[in-house]
């Protein structure tokens, strides 16, 4: 099997490779916990604690993990939506995102967009849909004024919305349609990269399929790159080219979808996959049931963060944090089992 | 699996009549709020009350035939002291010769009291001769040097003064029961009633009684005087007199034994302020302490009370939105600073402060009209912290919502984010809090006006209308002064609270039914 | 299309008319319900099959809203046999939760009303029609004979009381007659252990916020089981949980199924969960049952186009498809539904008869019932039987990967 080597020094500066639209290295985001008398920082929530991956242009990377594992924060930190990062590098088209001035950042915004999980809170309740979609287009002068209306109509049509929806308010729409509005808002800015933060989790099954198909269609049409964050493995498998599995702020396994699903290496990935319910009443599952629940990211376990729930836990796991290793070409895992 | 399901489909949406867009009609957002509001009976009642109050205050004032500060009068009879009558019991002295000085006068009194017929003074002996009742002549030999008398001569024409000699002769004539004398070539007759005439024309009158006018500008005619003096003897309390023009007036006589004065009082009709008049056709709610129409005052008072309420709330809200918005949106030290200011404002005991400021304005004699503006300003500036705190809280929670992250991700300007996305979402709560605070502001204003620190006379406000009830007599007897204003105040504040509650429930989607 | 916009909103007059009608209907129903001393005969009934714990018989639950009458449950008939698990699947707004709330009689009144039909609850020696029972009697049933596990374990526990106190309360309220405090506590500990809480003594003294979502859901299950109810309604009990935690809870529930003799009515939108849990499956769509049968019937021989579409639109791990099948359109809001097959407009398998009135229930086998015109004649049924023959194999292939 592959090189099975530890990846080089995490602090070395990233070298831009034009095939990657996004390069993330050792990204960390810690949120301070304020407490005590004078709101001093008494601890840190290590929401994202060293995430490294590269994302090829025009592909989709799935990011899976359970709630609280930091996948949503990762998405936002990449877009510079959570204030300043704690550590690491984020190269978007070769440009370090966190080096930009606020003005430059604003100019870059249209290129990188986000679609949210909750279609109810992600739309301004007091703006009509047309305004929600078109507002940013006008702000950035993306289209001439005369073409503005036609442009919005076209974007809405692309997302399966009808022109008369423009004057309505978000609360009049069902979840699926709201998600279409969110997609239209992101798409209207003609982005290159879209973070999809659990875009279908809040939707009904039949609507989920519609939205997934819509996202795929749009990707083909506009050559979009997605970072698809979800806890639903089946959806991730369907939509992604590469998959990253996160646990407690760390990317524990990362590789092509085929590799990951055919040959999951990390014990957590294995457990996660076996936990998916299968719509077959007779299927007998050899389910790996993980004991306990995710530890708090404010106080993560020492060594390998997964050791508290891992069935292969050794003494080494408890003491020493494993490093990322490439087991197969393009298939990385962070686990002591593969320290050979 | 069946083949059909492989037929993927992309052009959805178009062809179904089951599509909710066409089949299901919904209430528009405004209609939804309106419906929820109108379902709330109390809120609707409040709304109606407010509407009536507004019409009453703003339209009523225009329709009312009276002005706010128009004073009404009525004619009233008051018992006015007309003249005072005193019986003279002290001897007075006439100085017929220079040698009759203070010593002799003192000796005279002594002699009269001891009924001596003579006294010695300064080495001379004077005889005291009783000429008659109330008149003694002091003789130095045969020459009268002075006289002591009780009856007082008052001239018909008050500008005329009589010489002592004239008086002496006249008194002599009087005590002798009539007679005549000649002085300075003029002949005078004196009759036994004390009337002194010159050629049939009366010049003066002698009387033991002093009649003095108590009202300026009243000249007491001799006829009246005589009639009055005659009447005194009868000891009747009512005295009727018909003067030369044939007008008959009735007087009341009151004797005060301590001062030995009869006061003669007359019922005089005068124009007075029409105070505390009961409700009538002209004044539906009567008049107040100043004789102003109560209903009109109530209308104008409502106008001021409501106006003060609105202006104060607008000032407080504008300040609250700006400061709360800044605190909420920027957070960090801005938030900290503004919130500490809010805390400080919460610590200020507003009632004493307002009382002090009110007193200061009293001291500076601020014009009532300017005073109202100051009042609005003060209340507004003291009122913003609550609004600011609410706005900040709302914005803090809204800021964390995903749609705000979305605006950031879209690169939308900060000002636009605040004014297009944040503020509109705070407006429902703002409307509710404004409505609620309108009621309390009106109460505060009324309290201040009641204490005499807010709106001042001649401007009316419901508070200072109630202030008219300064004693229990008014409280118990003139219900029409304070009950209508109190009821107006109570209804308005209650109505504002009902409407505020109703709006809150209507705006709150959780109340969706 | 622009002309549709004003049509989308109710006019003031229409809205007033709706409100007036709603008031009339609801006040009448409420009056009936608020009567005092309802004779027992009015709600006593007989089970059609004594082996059933609950029988829903032509249940109609309507919500009288401002936008019109929402027929959330419109003629639902199914049985929950004793000791079995019945899964109710459907998308949001299909009426699956309203069905369970109708059973518990926890509908938001006065808007929500059971206007027709019976819900027969087997109490062992007698059977009652829950829909007609007065509130006082219902109070006795809830907890003792039926209990509910809610979706949100975060909000369904009271944050200010200790876990032990909350479970104790349930036990002493319903089952605790003559029990001492220690006995109640012992029972609570026993229940906590039953639901797989190892540190039961410790958890007894904890507050809800000290527990993770999965643990809270376990506590909720313990509370639901505490009084040995005849039927447990699990309303999306794992939806809010993470996959690994969901797996734990499902394992627990499956284990409990064999230990207790309660029936479970398991409501979910997740077909995978249903397949693991249920013996019988009821598929609901827009307030009606479109298909029902045993789990095998539904998963291996789905008949209704909606069921088929639902299964196809969910991507399955290990089975790559180029493009997901998606049911077009959206879930209808059940207001003013036309009287033809509700799924017709989203259906790609329509036949001629579909333009007719709403199809009645057609039996495909003893247990398998479907409401679809495709199976109204022999030919359609034969065709379907042919097409489903190979399904079990493909399903087996699907399940093998884990």
Image (spheres, coloured by chain):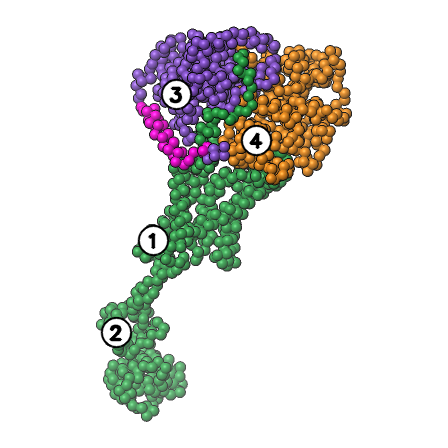
Chain colours: A orange, B green, C purple
Contact check, label 2 and label 3, Cβ < 8 Å: no
Type of secondary structure dominating the magenta stretch: helix
Say which element carries label 3.
Answer: strand
Q: Which residue is mark 1?
A: B285
Residue behind mark 2: B247
Residues marked 1 and 4, same chain: no
Residue at numbered disc 4: A156
At mark 2, the secondary structure is: loop
Q: Is residue C358 visible?
A: yes
The quadrant of the picture occupied by the N terminus of chain A is top right
Query: Going by the image, does A291 lie left or right of B305?
Result: right
**Circle 3 residue:** C60
Name the mark nearer the viewer: 1 or 4.
4
- Measured from the top left, where is residue C3 in percent x and y? 47, 34
Mark pair 2, 3: CA separation: 100 Å
The CA span between labels 3 and 4 is 39 Å
> Mark 2 vs mark 1: which is more N-terminal?
2
| Quarter of the figure with residue A182 | top right
| Picture coordinates of residue A87, whole percent (x, y) | 71, 28
Check chain identity for marks 2 and 3: say if they share one.
no
2 and 4 marks in contact (CB < 8 Å): no
SS for callout 1? loop
Whether residue A26 sits left or right of residue A129 in the image: it is right
Nearest to the observer: residue B391 or residue B271: B391
Q: Position of residue C320 (x, y in %)?
A: 61, 15
Labels 2 and 4 in the same subunit: no
Q: Is residue A239 magenta?
A: no
Residue drawn at x 67%, y 24% as measured from the top left: A58
Q: Tag 4's secondary structure?
A: helix
């Amino acid at each position: 099997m592959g090189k099975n080597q530890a990846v080089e020094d995490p602090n070395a500066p990233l070298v831009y490779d034009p095939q990657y639209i996004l390069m993330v290295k050792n990204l960390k985001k810690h949120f301070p916990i304020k407490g005590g008398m004078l709101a001093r920082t008494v601890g840190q929530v290590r929401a994202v604690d060293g995430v490294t991956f590269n994302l090829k242009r025009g592909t989709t990377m799935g990011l899976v993990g359970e709630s609280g594992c930091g996948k949503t924060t990762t998405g936002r930190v990449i877009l510079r939506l959570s204030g300043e990062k704690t550590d690491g590098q984020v190269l978007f088209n070769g440009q370090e995102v966190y080096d930009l001035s606020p003005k430059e950042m604003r100019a870059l915004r249209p290129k990188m967009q986000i679609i949210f999980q909750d279609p109810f809170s992600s739309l301004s309740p007091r703006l009509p849909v047309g305004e929600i979609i078109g507002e940013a287009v006008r702000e950035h002068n993306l289209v001439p004024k005369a073409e503005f209306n036609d442009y919005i109509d076209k974007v809405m049509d692309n997302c399966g919305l009808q022109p008369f929806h423009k004057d309505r308010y978000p609360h009049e729409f069902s979840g699926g349609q709201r998600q279409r509005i969110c997609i239209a808002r992101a798409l209207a800015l003609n982005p290159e990269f879209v973070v999809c933060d659990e875009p279908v989790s809040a939707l009904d099954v039949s609507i989920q399929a519609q939205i997934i198909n819509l996202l795929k269609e749009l990707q083909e049409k506009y050559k979009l790159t997605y970072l698809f964050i979800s806890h639903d493995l089946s959806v991730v498998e369907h939509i992604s080219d590469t998959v990253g599995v996160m646990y407690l702020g760390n990317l524990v396994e990362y590789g092509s979808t085929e590799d990951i699903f055919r040959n999951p290496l990390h014990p957590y990935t294995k457990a996660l996959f076996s936990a998916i319910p299968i719509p077959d009443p007779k299927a007998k599952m050899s389910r790996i049931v993980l004991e306990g629940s995710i530890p708090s990211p404010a106080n993560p376990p020492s060594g390998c963060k997964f050791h508290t729930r891992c069935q292969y836990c050794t003494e080494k796991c408890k003491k020493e944090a494993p490093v990322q290793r490439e087991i197969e070409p393009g298939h990385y895992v962070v686990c002591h089992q593969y320290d050979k | 699996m069946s083949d059909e399901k492989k037929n993927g489909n992309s052009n959805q949406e178009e062809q179904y009549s089951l599509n909710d867009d066409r089949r299901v009609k919904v209430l528009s957002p405004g209609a939804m709020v309106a419906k929820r509001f109108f379902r709330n009976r109390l809120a609707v009642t409040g709304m109606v009350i407010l509407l009536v109050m507004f019409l009453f205050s703003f339209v009523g004032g225009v329709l009312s035939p009276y002005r706010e500060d128009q004073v009404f009068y009525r004619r009233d009879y008051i018992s006015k002291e007309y003249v005072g009558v005193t019986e003279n019991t002290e001897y007075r002295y006439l100085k017929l010769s220079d040698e009759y000085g203070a010593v002799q006068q003192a000796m005279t009194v002594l002699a009269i009291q001891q009924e001596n017929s003579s006294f010695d003074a300064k080495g001379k002996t004077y005889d005291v001769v009783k000429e008659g009742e109330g008149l003694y002549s002091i003789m130095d030999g045969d020459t009268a040097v002075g006289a002591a008398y009780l009856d007082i001569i008052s001239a018909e024409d008050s500008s005329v003064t009589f010489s002592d000699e004239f008086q002496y002769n006249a008194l002599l004539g009087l005590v002798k029961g009539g007679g005549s004398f000649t002085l300075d070539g003029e002949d005078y007759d004196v009759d036994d009633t004390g009337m002194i005439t010159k050629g049939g024309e009366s010049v003066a009158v002698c009387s033991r009684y002093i009649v003095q006018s108590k009202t300026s500008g009243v000249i007491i005619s001799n006829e009246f005087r005589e009639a009055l003096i005659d009447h005194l003897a009868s000891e009747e309390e009512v005295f009727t007199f018909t003067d030369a023009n044939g007008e008959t007036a009735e007087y009341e006589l009151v004797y005060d034994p301590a001062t030995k004065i009869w006061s003669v009082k007359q019922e005089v009709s005068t124009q007075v302020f029409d105070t505390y008049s009961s409700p009538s056709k002209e004044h539906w709610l009567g008049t107040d302490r100043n004789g102003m129409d109560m209903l009109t005052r109530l209308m104008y008072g409502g106008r001021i009370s409501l106006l003060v309420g609105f202006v104060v709330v607008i000032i407080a809200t504008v300040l609250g939105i700006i400061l709360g918005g800044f605190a909420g949106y920027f957070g960090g030290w801005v938030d900290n600073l503004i919130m500490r200011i809010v805390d400080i404002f919460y610590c200020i005991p507003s009632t004493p402060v307002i009382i002090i400021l009110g007193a200061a304005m009293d001291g500076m004699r601020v014009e009532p009209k300017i005073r109202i503006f100051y009042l609005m300003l003060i209340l507004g500036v003291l009122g913003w912290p609550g609004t600011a705190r609410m706005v900040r809280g709302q914005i803090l929670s809204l800021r964390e919502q995903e749609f705000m992250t979305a605006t950031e991700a879209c690169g939308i300007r900060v000002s636009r984010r605040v004014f297009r996305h944040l503020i509109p979402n705070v407006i429902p709560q703002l409307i509710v809090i404004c409505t609620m605070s309108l009621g309390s502001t009106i109460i505060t204003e009324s309290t201040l006006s009641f204490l005499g620190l807010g709106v001042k006379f001649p401007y009316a406000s419901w508070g200072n209308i109630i202030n008219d009830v300064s004693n229990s007599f008014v409280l118990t007897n003139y219900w029409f002064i304070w009950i209508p204003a109190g009821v107006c105040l109570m209804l308005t504040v209650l109505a504002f609270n009902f409407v505020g509650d109703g709006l809150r429930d209507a705006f709150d989607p959780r109340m969706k039914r | 299309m622009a002309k549709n916009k004003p049509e989308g909103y109710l006019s003031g007059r229409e809205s007033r008319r709706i409100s007036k009608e709603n008031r009339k209907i609801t006040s009448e129903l409420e009056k009936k319900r608020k009567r005092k001393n309802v004779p027992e005969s009015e709600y006593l009934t007989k089970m059609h099959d004594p082996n059933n714990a609950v029988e829903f018989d032509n249940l109609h639950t309507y919500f009288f809203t401002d936008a019109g009458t929402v027929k959330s449950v419109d003629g639902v008939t199914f049985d929950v046999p004793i000791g079995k698990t019945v899964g109710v699947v459907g998308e949001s707004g299909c009426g699956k939760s309203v069905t369970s709330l109708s059973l518990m009689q926890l509908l938001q009144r006065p808007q929500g009303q059971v206007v027709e039909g019976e819900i027969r609850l087997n109490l062992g020696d007698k059977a009652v029609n829950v829909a007609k029972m007065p509130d006082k009697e219902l109070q006795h049933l809830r907890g003792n004979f039926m209990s509910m596990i809610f979706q949100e374990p975060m909000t369904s526990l009271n944050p200010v009381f200790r876990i032990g106190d909350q479970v104790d309360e349930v036990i002493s309220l319903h089952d605790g007659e003559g029990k001492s405090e220690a006995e109640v506590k012992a029972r609570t500990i026993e229940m906590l252990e039953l639901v797989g809480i190892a540190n039961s003594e410790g958890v007894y003294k904890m507050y809800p916020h000290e527990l993770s979502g999965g643990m809270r859901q376990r506590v909720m299950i313990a509370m639901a089981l505490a009084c040995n109810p005849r039927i447990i309604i699990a309303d999306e009990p794992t939806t809010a949980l993470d996959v690994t935690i969901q797996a734990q809870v499902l394992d627990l529930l499956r284990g409990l199924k064999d230990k207790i003799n309660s029936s479970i009515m398991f409501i979910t939108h997740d077909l995978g969960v249903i397949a693991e849990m249920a013996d019988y499956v009821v598929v609901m769509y827009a307030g009606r049952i479109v298909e029902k049968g045993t789990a095998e019937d539904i998963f291996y021989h789905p008949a209704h186009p909606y069921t088929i579409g639902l299964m196809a639109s969910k991507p399955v791990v290990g089975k790559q498809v180029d493009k997901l099948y998606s049911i077009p359109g959206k879930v209808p809001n059940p207001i003013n539904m036309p009287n033809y097959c509700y799924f017709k407009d989203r259906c790609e398998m329509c036949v001629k008869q579909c333009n007719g009135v709403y199809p009645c229930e057609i039996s495909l086998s003893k247990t398998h019932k479907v409401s679809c015109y495709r199976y109204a004649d022999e030919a359609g049924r034969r065709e379907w039987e042919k097409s489903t023959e190979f399904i079990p194999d493909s399903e087996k292939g699907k399940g093998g990967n884990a």
